[in-house]
Image (spheres, rainbow, N blue to C red):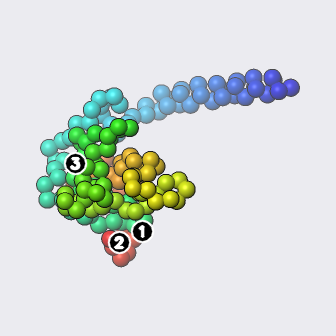
Amino acid sequence: MKTFSLIGTLGIAAVLGIGGYALAQQAQVTALRTDPVNAPNRLGPDFQWKGKEGRMQRNYRQQPPLIPHSIAQYQMDLRVNQCLSCHDWSKAGERNAPTLSMTHYLDRSGMETDHIAGTRYFCNQCHVPQADVAPLVSNTFVPSSPAVR
């Protein structure tokens, strides 16, 4: 009986997968990205950072701070996190950069450490750079009031 249910489940999954692919092909699904996924991102001439330095207004409670500068050439991998060269607590004062929240130095069990926690190592999981560019899609989002800092 278990063999039949496994074979039946695999058969149904295959039919759904093929059907979904056929629907996507028929609907002419297109992406917002114009370059292939493995190609580097191209920044247009309207993607300027000048005059955007400094803290940016948050749009809702608990929103992670936005990055007010380009991170296009920043190395961030298992060995190096270039954000920490300015924002780590040991360097932020001399670099005149905001320090990381103390929550970034708590391990999984809630114990405070003197280095950034592995769960908070990849900054752009939560923090994103911003620039004034034309929106890719229409947006009707309205920030909560009053403005949150």
Q: Can residue 107 be seen in this view?
A: yes
Mark-to-mark CA distance, 1 and 2: 7 Å
Mark-to-mark CA distance, 3 and 1: 24 Å
Residue under the point 53% across and 31% down: 23
Mark-to-mark CA distance, 3 and 2: 23 Å
Query: Residue 7: horizontal and vertical position, in percent?
Result: 75, 23
Please report contact status of discs 3 and 1: CB closer than 8 Å, yes or no.
Answer: no
Q: Is residue 141 visible?
A: no
Q: Mark 1 points at which residue?
A: 61
Q: Name the residue under label 3.
A: 70
Q: Which of marks 3 and 1 is nearer the N terminus?
A: 1
Q: Earlier in the sequence, mark 1 or mark 2?
A: 1
Q: What element carries label 1?
A: loop
* The one of 13 and 110 positioned closer to us in this rendering: 110
Query: Residue 47: horizontal and vertical position, in percent?
Result: 19, 47
Q: Mark 2 points at which residue?
A: 148
Quadrant position of the N terminus in the picture: top right
Disc 1 residue type (three-letter):
Arg
Residue under the point 56% across and 31% down: 20
Residue under the point 29% across and 29% down: 39
Q: Is mark 2 on a helix, strand or loop?
A: loop
Q: Which of marks 3 and 2 is nearer the N terminus?
A: 3
Q: Residue furthest front?
A: 114
Q: Residue furthest right?
A: 1
**Residue 134 versus residue 76 in the image, above or below:** below
